[in-house]
Amino acid sequence: MKKTGFYDPLCENKFEKRRGLIHRYPDRVVLTVTGRCFAYCRFCFRKKNWSGFNGFDLSGAVEYIKENKNIQEVLISGGDPFFLSDEQLGRILAPIKAIDHVKFIRIGTRVLSSNPLRIDNNCVSAIAEYKPLWIAAHINHTDEITKEFVNSASMIIDAGIPIVAQTVLLKGINDNADILERLFCKLVEIGIKPYYLFGCDYAQGNGHFRVPIESAVKIINKLRGSISGLCVPNFSFDLPQGGGKIIVEPDRLRKRYKNRYVFVNFEGKEFDYDDV
Ligand SMILES: *Cc1c(COP(=O)(O)O)cnc(C)c1O
């Protein structure tokens, strides 16, 4: 039978230590608080969470975080955490914030692009209580940057909550350097740091969105040579079988002999570098 993608491409089920809690890396955990979103992305890697995954008991997850002192960051994700009410969000954030060894919290969301009006003064002041807090906003194209997107992002940033962006590289949508250059520069202009450009995970029904690594690296190379380093995210994708994320950059090392390195710069010119 033709392979059409995986039910759980990141093997998150294997790392789910408590209901909703994924512990893959030593210092940080992902807490999925809902399966609901404002819009369901065709290329979602967590489609498995879409059904029957809302309002469940997170006390086991909070206990686990309390017991594991090397966890210094909790990444609240979903689904979209902003699908919950401000009160529900507060009830999740408060006990996490109260844990001494948790130093900062991140919320992964697509709210700015899929429902920016969800972000109002009440919402911003509710979440600002839990600083240091970072927002990781999912956005793939400048067409998603509406006036409302900019307003909501500015309210969050003005409240002292920095925003980074995560983009999924999608065939036929944004797999070209000009489109991404415009997107990433526009984000920096708004005050949002492009953080990750993700290869599309091979979940069921995602195959036709996948872009070869070679094309992705070419795009990154082009961006590295033309726009501010602030505008260039890490190109990253998840290894199969739960291997975790890796970051891939254009290969700059041509040769090495003892402490002599030969590097190729962004213009394709070679330079010797004598290391210490
Ligand atoms: C992506 C991810 C994180 C966060 O990784 P960063 O590189 O810190 O952004 C944490 N846990 C899991 C399971 C992840 O997939």
Image: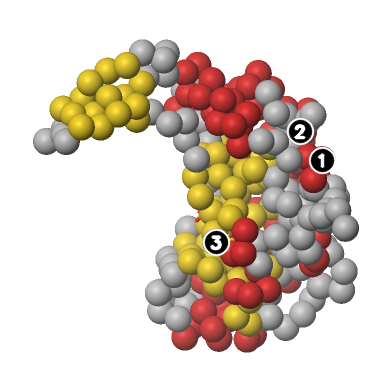
Whether residue 134 can be seen here: yes
Residue occupying image coordinates x 16% and y 34%: 259
For this view, does 146 lie left or right of residue 230? right
Q: Choose top left, top right, bottom left or bottom right for residue 108.
A: bottom right
For this view, does 258 lie left or right of residue 35? left
Indicate which disc, 2 or 1, sits on the residue closer to the N terminus: 2
For this view, does 207 lie left or right of residue 135? right
Residue wearing tag 3: 243
Residue wearing tag 1: 208
Residue occupying image coordinates x 51% and y 31%: 232
Spot occupied by residue 141 in the image (x, y as percentages of width and height): 73, 31
Q: SS of the residue at dot 3? A: loop
Spot occupied by residue 140 in the image (x, y as percentages of width and height): 71, 36
In the rendered image, which quarter contains the C terminus? Answer: top left
Q: Choose top left, top right, bottom left or bottom right for residue 240.
A: bottom right
Spot occupied by residue 257 in the image (x, y as percentages of width and height): 20, 32
Q: Amino acid at mark 3?
A: Gly
Local packing at callout 3 (Cα closer than 10 Å; few below 14, some 14-19, many 20+) is few
Ligand 1 is found in the corner quadrant, namely: bottom right
Check whether the beta carbons of the residues at disc 2 and disc 1 lie within 8 A of each other: yes
Residue wearing tag 2: 171
Spot occupied by residue 153 in the image (x, y as percentages of width and height): 65, 40
Q: Amino acid at mark 1?
A: His
Check whether the beta carbons of the residues at disc 2 and disc 3 lie within 8 A of each other: no
Q: Amino acid at mark 2?
A: Lys
Task: Give the Cα separation between the discs numbered 2 and 1.
Answer: 7 Å
Residue occupying image coordinates x 34% and y 30%: 253
